[in-house]
Amino acid sequence: MASWPARLRMTACVLFVFGAAPVFAQRIVYEAPFSGQPLGQFLQRSASITCRSELADSTGYYPKGSGHSLLSSGLEKQSKPASWRLSLVGDEEAVVVPGQGGTPERFQVIRRDSTSIILARVGQGLAGGTVEILMIDPQNGSFVASDSSVGPLWNRTTVWVGRCE
C-alpha cells in the first residue's frame, strides 16, 4: 500500500487529469430547539392563523456600481418580529396580510393536508419579479417563508423561520 504522501500525490494527479479541483467549503451552522403546537384548526375550510418569525436569512446579489455586484449573505435576529396573518378562502386561495395592517395579498393554495400547508404567489412590479412561498407544518406549527426577487435593485432570496398559532 502506498504511503500517505504518495496517495495524496496520486489523488492530486487523478484530480488534475480529470479536471476536478478539490472543494473546500465553509459552512456556518445555527441550531436552536423548537417546539410548537399542532394546527388542526387550520385544516378546516375557512380558518385563520398568525405566523411570526424573529429570524431571517437573506442572500443575493446587490448592485455596487460600475457594473459590479456584491454577493451578500447573512442570518439575523429581527429587531421586530415579522408576522403574517393567513386566512384561507375555500380550497384554492388564501389571503395573507403581512405585518401589522399591511396590504392583503392573494396566494394560491398549493397543498393543504395533515402533513403540509403550502401557499405561493408570483408577482410582477416596478422592482422586478417576485416569488413568495409560505410553508407550514400543521403537526407542530413550524413556519418557513421565502421571498425571491429579481430586478434592477437585486437578485436575492430572504427566508424567515418561525411558528404559527
Image: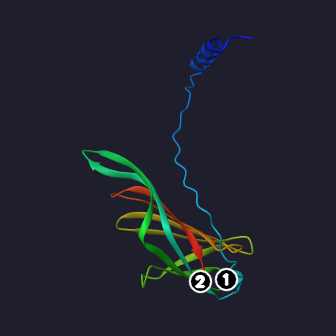
Residue 11 as seen in the image, left or right of residue 115? left
Residue 55 vertical placement versus 41 (above, below):
above
Residue at the disc numbered 2:
49
Q: Quadrant of residue 39?
A: bottom right
- The way the protein has been coloured in the rendering is rainbow
Q: How many marks?
A: 2
| Residue at x 35%, y 47% (from the top left corner) | 70
Which of the pair 94/30 is nearer the observer? 30
The answer to whether the residue labelled 1 contacts the one labelled 2, judged by CB atoms less than 8 Å apart, is: yes
Furthest residue to the bottom?
A: 46
Residue 161 as seen in the image, left or right of residue 2? left
| Image coordinates for residue 97, horizontal then vertical, percent | 48, 81
| Residue at x 73%, y 75% (from the top left corner) | 113
Cα distance between the residues tagged 1 and 2: 7 Å
Residue at the disc numbered 1:
42
| Image coordinates for residue 153, horizontal then vertical, percent | 33, 58
Mark seen at residue 31: none
Crowding near pointer 1: few (<14 within 10 Å), some, many (20+)? many
Q: Amino acid at mark 1?
A: Phe
| Image coordinates for residue 74, horizontal then vertical, percent | 43, 54
Crowding near pointer 2: few (<14 within 10 Å), some, many (20+)? some
- For marks 1 and 2 on the same chain, the one whose residue lies earlier in the sequence: 1
| Residue at x 70%, y 86% (from the top left corner) | 44
Mark 1: which secondary structure?
helix
Q: Amino acid at mark 2?
A: Ile
| Residue at x 64%, y 87% (from the top left corner) | 47
Mark 2: which secondary structure?
strand
Furthest residue to the left?
A: 66
Which of the pair 8/61 is nearer the observer? 8
Residue 37 as seen in the image, left or right of residue 20? right
| Image coordinates for residue 143, horizontal then vertical, percent | 59, 70
The N terminus appears in which quarter of the rendering?
top right
